[in-house]
Amino acid sequence: MGYNITEKILLAHAVGVKSIKPGDFIMAKVDFCFGNDITAPIAIQEFRKLKRKKVFHKDRIALIPDHFLPAKDMKSANQAKELKDFAREFGITNYFEVGRMGVEHALLPERGLLLPGDIIIGADSHTCTHGALGAFATGVGSTDLAYVMAFGECWFKVPETIKLVFKGKPRKWVGGKDLILHAIGDLGVSGARYKALEISGDALQNLSMDERFSMCNMAIEAGAKSGIIEPDKETERYMKAAIKRYKPQRKSYKIFKSDKDAVYSDVREYDISKLQPVVAEPHLPSNTKPVHELKDVKVDQVVIGSCTNGRISDLKKAAAILKNRKIAPGIRLVIIPATQDIYKEAMKEGYAETFIKAGGVFCTPSCGPCLGGHMGILAEGEVALATTNRNFVGRMGHPKSFIYLANPAVAAASAITGKITHPSDL
Amino acid sequence: MIFKGNVFRFGDDVNTDEIIPARYMNTSDPASLAEHCMEDADPEFVKKKKEGDIIVAGENFGCGSSREHAPIAIKAAGISCVIAKSFARIFYRNAINIGLAILTAPEAVDHLKTGDKVEVDAAKGEISKSGQTATYRSDIFPEFIKKIIKSGGLMEYAAKKN
């Protein structure tokens, strides 16, 4: 009986065992770990309890003040300062100050800091994003991060794996976001609880790394421990470019692939050749519908950004629709590139100018309104359409506000009409 | 460990944004977080609950974000334990790591409602309603997790290991 990619990566990192099976508890070596301005302060406090003089590896930890930064208030400023002080004290190389910072799940892969075959631990639930590289990446809490910062290890229960097979060529305006929302609609928000989601199928051949990051990013919204995609030519192309551009310390990596006789707890196939853009209605990401079925849903705010859809190809799609158009009167359009380099590229390519001329705002990188932090909080009764990942009660502001989730093209089209709109209906 | 308290019953998929909204996460001070515990699920919860009370919920309790602030807020609010049909993965880890008692007990959840008085023997995994003889069983933790719980949390386990 063979192993799937997740089991192979876990076995290669497991301490003191020669074989593994789902349900086993293992200690495994961690290649890279990180936290943000919300989760790292508690991790730092817990780490200090151990009274250790060193972290496990000063180049394998990243501290990224991305959630409430640039600091929205004094308390947030204090939390960010805890990261900076700790990074200085322990010589942590990957600390990113405002101006060089980006949303963690866009920034770390962009800079080539995470590699295929890695075990990656982040004190943030969307750490599953990095499975798109063919790595095992999972979100943990602050105390787990403290433990990893100290020992370079983490305990895991070996998960069962659900294999998702996406078949067919996606239609125009359909991207990774739609595929994963479609699957979450099928699985439900706890359908993959404790399990790994192995994302596969010929549809992936047509999806860039940006699209694949969007897909693995939302594995957690089905309750999954991780999302993972086997590396292919596109993964290699992405890694080669990132390593050439940013020259990270680690440059070589190992590619793992699932055995032909690997075991899965469930296999689900989706023919996506006829799939239309998908929208998740309030208040769960699993409340999905094809965009055409939403009639006359008026919106007050459109948000394009986040670790799900704040990458350059997302902004390109939105700019193509917004070019030479104006957004509807009374609508707010908030666009947040996920990293500083995406910001710069959006300036160079003219997307930023397109957004501003259309009547939107083009913000500095931050998680911002996605989690109700800042830069676009909703008032009571307001409705938002966002390219973000969660539409829980109160997620973006007032507990009586409403969030719809969609891809960047639907978001841009909806900003123009003022109601949820299929881009082809413009 | 024996816990006695009044039940506050919640539904399925209670997420961490409801347990502790991000607007209060510009601090990690447990007492401050406790003031807003469960606010977006039940704005009156903090006023109604008493020391030792028990949260009972359906499937997938604590889904969503990785914020450890969620179990911290519950523990600091004086809630003695959380009983659910199932827990979201990161919340489960976080609760164990910080020493918040959690019990997976689907049958108990089906028989408990807000206002019930219950007694929980966390070590034995037994839950019973006051004045009734019926006892509901909870899942037993795997040995590996028992070691962490016995130490009092992950950092305490790590300190021993050191």
Image (cartoon, coloured by chain):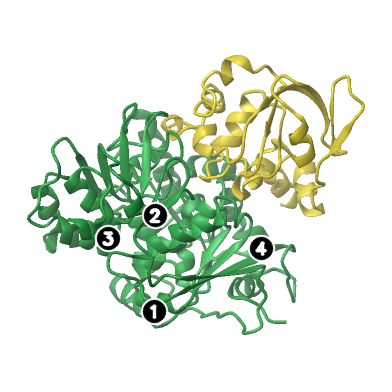
Chain colours: A green, B yellow
Q: Please give the residue where the numbered disc 1 appears in the rendered image.
A: A205
- Where does residue A87 sit, x and y in percent of width and height? 43, 49
Q: Are both tags, 1 and 4, on one chain?
A: yes
Kindly state the secondary structure of the residue where label 4 is placed. loop
Q: How far apart are marks 2 and 3 (CA)?
A: 17 Å
Q: Which residue is drawn at 49% across and 72% down?
A: A229
Q: Residue furthest top?
A: B47
Q: How crowded is mark 2: few (under 14 residues within 10 Å), some or many (20 or more)?
A: many
Dot 3 amino acid type: Asp
Q: Distance between the residues labelled 1 and 4?
A: 26 Å
Q: Nearer the viewer, mark 4 or mark 2?
A: 4
Dot 1 amino acid type: Gln
Whether pointer 4 and pointer 2 mark residues with C-beta atoms closer than 8 Å, the reply is no
> Reading the chain from its start, which is encountered first: label 1 or label 4?
4
> Reading the chain from its start, which is encountered first: label 4 or label 2?
2
Q: How far apart are marks 4 and 3 (CA)?
A: 32 Å
Whether pointer 3 and pointer 1 mark residues with C-beta atoms closer than 8 Å, the reply is no
Question: In terms of image quadrants, where is residue B71?
Answer: top right
Chain assignment, label 2: A
> Reading the chain from its start, which is encountered first: label 2 or label 1?
2
> Reading the chain from its start, which is encountered first: label 2 or label 3?
2
| Badge number at residue A314 | 3
Question: In terms of image quadrants, where is residue A132?
Answer: bottom left
Q: Which residue is drawn at 38% across and 34% down?
A: A76
